[in-house]
Image: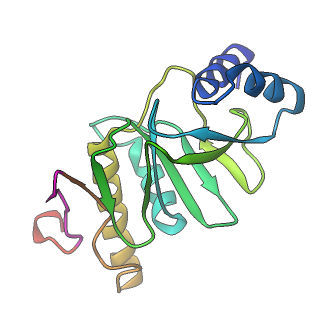
Amino acid sequence: MALTQWTKAMEWLAAAADDPQAYERDCRRSGAGIHLLAAGRLWDVLIVPACLGLRAADMLDDLPCGGPGPVLLDGRRREVGFFLPPDPRATWVGDGTRHITQGGWIAVPAPHCRWGDLRWLVPPDGSGALTTPRAMELALHRATRELVRCHGTPIHTGRSPHRRADGTSTAIDSTSRRDR
């Protein structure tokens, strides 16, 4: 990551810190430290099991409705976190799925960190680009369908994690005939 891009990414992440100047100083000094940043202001984070999230992250680049925003891999917990626009009213449901929003916190490494147990699969670029909920839902649906096809049985429930806003489900069943 070029120095200018790294600086912009650090400043973007710092905007979610309780003390942005301390965050920036720490990033510049130690480089690879882990920091807790507030969710719900600049972004929400959708966390899914790694088997599903890794495949969905690969698929985001190929979708017409937007590429990926920042994506984190937590190797110890075997989870992948996708940065989405903040929407405290939205509810994402699915086995092993958590939606971190207003009032929640997320541990992040420095923006250039691409190694270790907690690392960026797609680092922030400082532009504020995030994964759209529609692209996320579509990628998760396709990844679920592929995992079901490859393994013969659903890894989780056979239904991809999906977003529920205002009590309505936009779920796409992975066994839908339309997408086979």
Q: Quadrant of the N terminus?
A: top right
**Residue 96 drawn at (x, y percent):** 45, 70
Q: Quadrant of the C terminus?
A: bottom left
Residue at the left extreme, as displayed? 178
Task: Residue 151: name its quadrant.
Answer: bottom left
Residue placed most toward the observer, 168 or 89: 89
**Residue 74 drawn at (x, y percent):** 64, 58
**Residue 176 drawn at (x, y percent):** 15, 71
Task: Residue 140: name its quadrant.
Answer: bottom left
Display colour scheme: rainbow
The residue that appears at 79% across and 29% down in the rendered structure is: 27
Determine if the magenta segment contains residue 167: yes
Residue placed most toward the observer, 141 or 168: 168
The residue that appears at 81% across and 40% down in the rendered structure is: 33
Residue at the right extreme, as displayed? 29
The residue that appears at 32% across and 57% down in the rendered structure is: 92
Residue at the top extreme, as displayed? 4
Question: What's the magenta region?
Answer: 166-174
For the stretch drawn in magenta, the main secondary structure is: loop
Residue placed most toward the observer, 75 or 15: 15
Task: Residue 134: name its quadrant.
Answer: top left
Determine if the magenta segment contains residue 163: no
User: Where is 52 relative to 14, above or below?
Assistant: below
110 to the left or right of 95: right
Residue placed most toward the observer, 52 or 74: 74
User: Where is 101 relative to 75, above or below?
Assistant: above
**Residue 83 drawn at (x, y percent):** 47, 41
So how many labels did they put on this image? 0
